[in-house]
Image (cartoon, grey):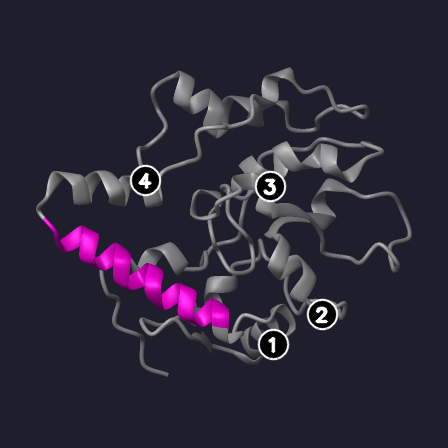
Amino acid sequence: MPPSTDQPGQGIFRYPAAEHETRHGPSWYTDDADYKPWLRDEFDYRCVYCLCRETWMPDGHRAFSVEHLIPRSRAISPSEYASLAYACCVCNATRCADPLPLHPSAAPGLHLEILADGTARPLSLVGAAFIRLCGLQRPDLVSFRKRMLDTVALLAASDRADAADLLRSYLSYPDDLPDLSRLKPPGGNAREEGKRQSAFARRLRGELPATY
């Protein structure tokens, strides 16, 4: 299958083509919502399914939730961090309860891509199943992706300072980054060093890029 031709800014909907290396390891929260600050940072403040970002939502992180990759009705043990992800509430509600053909951290970019017209194209049978089970071809989402791609492309092509400022607002990290150093999971944190690589810590050190 021939590769697609990117337009400026199409990378905002590019799925990772390498396996995600887990940064954090909190454990034994009794309320799944307590995992949310960790998952926000773990998955770069965007939905693992549709890749929409917190900064694009009027309600920010309140439009996102903890996603159980293994439905709670089928789980045989308390929620484990490795079985959780970060998803927008619409994708969380849309996704079928059937098992996913791949973990969202397992290089989904090898199996699907988003085209310039906003549609999702499978690159494998696994990708086709992932698109179907996660509802990634729903019409409203396709239209939204197309508008975002066109908007980012227009702003990137402009030489106006206000266009550059607006582009940064679309592609920046949210203002309310969680300070993970203040959090004390009941079961501890298996990857304590990940706190230093959190977006909050990098912003404090002046290392966080303006956009991503």
Q: Is residue 111 visible?
A: no
Q: Nearer the viewer, mark 1 or mark 3?
A: 3
The CA distance from mark 1 to mark 4 is: 31 Å
Q: Tell me the amino acid under the disc marked 2.
A: Cys
Q: Nearer the viewer, mark 2 or mark 3?
A: 3
**Total numbered labels:** 4
Q: Which mark is residue 62?
A: 3
Q: Nearer the viewer, mark 1 or mark 4?
A: 4
Q: Tell me the amino acid under the disc marked 4.
A: Ser
* Disc with the residue nearer the chain's start (1 vs 3): 3
Q: Which mark is residue 96?
A: 2
The CA distance from mark 2 to mark 3 is: 22 Å
For mark 4, what is the residue?
169
The residue drawn where x is 58% and y is 47% is 63
* Disc with the residue nearer the chain's start (2 vs 3): 3
Q: Tell me the amino acid under the disc marked 3.
A: Arg
* Disc with the residue nearer the chain's start (1 vs 4): 1
- From the viewer's perspective, tell me whether residue 110 is left or right of residue 102: left
